[in-house]
Image (spheres, rainbow, N blue to C red):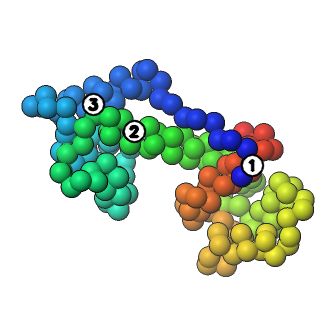
Amino acid sequence: MGEEEQEFSLSEEQISEIRDAFNMYDREKKGEISTSILGTVMKNLGHNLKPDQLAECIEAVDGDGSGTVDFDEFLALMAKKTKEAEDERELREVFRVFDKNSRGVIDVADLKLIFKALDPDMAEDEVDQIISEVDEDGSGTVDFEGISYTEKIDWLFRFDMLNIH
């Protein structure tokens, strides 16, 4: 992508909140919590995950299959999920800018204009390829939920280049 991505870090207040939530569930004060309650702890911190997302998180922090996660692993997971949530909020705002009629969708014709404005040298077939990936049902519109996380991050990077917020 060319430009270096700005490193994300949690604030001291966020770390304190995460530590308090972790400690509340570390009842035996062993410095670890069971992966079986990971979803509950994350939900209490504002991260409502779908079952497949939770399973992915458990796999990421419990590589040895011990069934527990220590605070450092939990903190790293929460930093990642917090960054994802902030990226998503920012992209939702950008999406609203282009959702001209406040319908929750962007017309494909408008999206083509957006991508051409972002990169005037982008080939028409490349634009069409991107459009076909996000307009899978051929409806002529793209809704926010229909865009994958990877595509959202790519779009956010492109929109940031235009200073759209």
Q: Residue at x 73, y 44 (%)?
A: 3
| Residue 43 against residue 57 in the figure, above or below | above
Q: Quadrant of the C terminus?
A: top right
The reply to whether residue 144 is visible in this rendering is: no
The residue under label 2 is: 76
Residue 87 versus residue 111: which sits nearer the camera?
87
Q: Write down the quadrant of residue 137 in the picture.
A: bottom right
- Mark whose residue sits in front, 3 or 1: 1
Where residue 13 appears, as percent x and y from the top left, is 42, 21
> Is residue 57 found left or right of 108 in the rendered image?
left
Amino acid at pointer 2: Ala
Identify the disc placed on residue 21: 3
Q: Write down the quadrant of residue 122 in the picture.
A: bottom right
> Is residue 117 found left or right of 111 in the rendered image?
right
Amino acid at pointer 1: Gly
The residue under label 1 is: 2
SS assignment at label 3: helix
- Give yes or no for contact between labels 2 and 3 (Cβ–Cβ under 8 Å): no
